[in-house]
Structures are given as structure tokens and as C-alpha cells.
Amino acid sequence: QMDSKDYLIALMTVNGLGRVRLRHLLADYPDPKEIWNISISEWQDIGLQQNIFDSLQQIKKQNPFGRAQSLLSKGIKITAWGDPDYPILLRETSDSPILLYYQGSLDCLNQRCIAVVGSRKMTSYGHQVTEYLSSQMASLGITIISGLAQGVDTLAHQTALINHTPTVAVLGGGLFNLFPVENQQLAEDIIKDGGAIISESPPETEP
């Protein structure tokens, strides 16, 4: 049995559909199952190309049932754009992802947030400033969002954890491919401390 997230996961793989078109479709068909089962005549009435419809039919043959449940059994949760747990501020952006794959808790993303990103090869000054600013913001309970990369990103996450403030890592790949690998323990600490590791890419995606 497929749930709505299974349909969205499958629809995101349709060649030529893209999230902008998919979001427009979801405005008219709020239940993704309706898009999945759309007829060729409806498709043409909407004005979408035949090749996209053909790609949808090919995806259907692959029978992508139970994907969301399978990922959940591996510790990966999914939130969709219309879900209550989808981050409020992210939903308001013009190009917000339709799906987010994550581990941990998204609650801290509904608090005050700030992104801290920078060079992978820090100067001593970069180290000093990153540590100072991150500790000041963390002490005020501001959620620090970064990318789990080496250098500034790593230090920003570590400083938040030292100050017992949740931090969020946004990955450039999927959750099965954490990069750099030496930050695996940091990722686990982020989750353990009430933060989250998130990605808009399917878990198998290479960084």
C-alpha cells in the first residue's frame, strides 16, 4: 500500500516534471494520488507535454510501493510541503523543496534561526570569528544551520553543541552518503542533541 509520500517520491522522479510544475499540479490536485492516476485527456487539458506523461507511465511500471515505510525502518523520516511538521519558514520561501528527508527533530527550525557557512580551510581569524559569533548566537537560543562540511561549517555545529543548543545540518547529498565521512560522529551528536540532519535529495544521492 502506498501513502501520499510514496506518490510524491515517485512523482519527483518523473522526467521533465520538476518541483515547480509539481507544486502547481498539487495546487489543483492536493492528493498526490490524483496526479498519479491522471488520465491523458486531463493531462492534455492542463497543457503538459506528452513526454512527461510517458515518463509517468514508465515510473508506474516500476511499482514504487512502500518506499516511505522502508526508509522509516532505516531511521529516515520524510516531511512533505503541506505537512504540519514541515518547517514554517522554509514553506514560505519561493522555491521550497516538496520533500525533506531527515533524521532527528525539525522543531528547532521553527525557532529563530541563522545560517553560518564559510571556507573549508579556515584561517585562524576565521576560526576565531566563527567560534565567537556561533557561541554568542547559541547562547541566545538561536538555531545554527550549516552544511556539515569541513572548516567553518563543522566549527559552527560543534560550537552550538558545546552551548547545548540544537543545530541543523543541510546536506549537499543524501542521508546515506554523509560527507565528509569524518563528520559521521558529529552528525550523530547533532541528532542526539535535539537537532537534525536534512536533505531535499533522496538518501542514495551522492554529494
Image (spheres, rainbow, N blue to C red):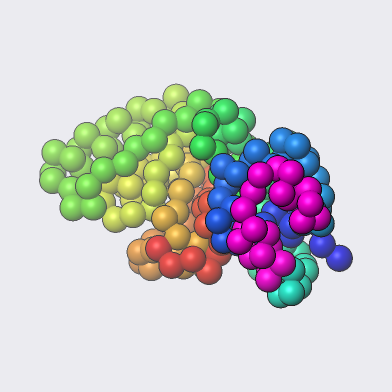
Image coords of residue 8 (percent x, y): 69, 54
- The residue nearer to you, when weighing 34 against 196, is 34
Q: In which quadrant of the rendered view does residue 29 lie?
A: top right
- Residue 85, image quadrant: top right
| Residue 45 belongs to magenta span | yes
Quadrant position of the C terminus in the picture: bottom left
Q: In this rendering, would 168 be left or right of 72?
A: left
Residue 192 sits inside the magenta stretch: no
Q: 115 or 93, which is in the foreground?
A: 93
* Residue under the image location 55 percent in, 56 percent down: 16
Residue 122 visible: yes
Residue 140: percent from left, percent from top: 44, 24
Q: Residue at x 18, y 48 (%)?
A: 122
Where residue 124 sits: x, y (%)?
13, 44
- Whether residue 109 appears in this view of the structure is no
* 171 lies above or below 143: below
Q: Position of residue 136 (x, y in %)?
A: 35, 27
Residue closest to the eye, 159 or 84: 84
Judged from this view, the residue extending furthest toward the right is: 1
In the rendered view, does 186 fall on the left or right side of 83? left
> Please, is residue 35 above or below residue 2 in the view?
above
Of residues 148 and 17, the one drawn nearer to the viewer in this rendering: 17
**The N terminus lies in quadrant:** bottom right
Residue beneath the point at 38% across and 68% down: 181
As displayed, is residue 192 above or below residue 164?
below
Who's the residue at 81% across and 55% down the image? 39
Q: Give the number of marks.
A: 0
**Principal secondary structure, stretch drawn in magenta:** helix
The stretch of residues the image draws in magenta is 39-59
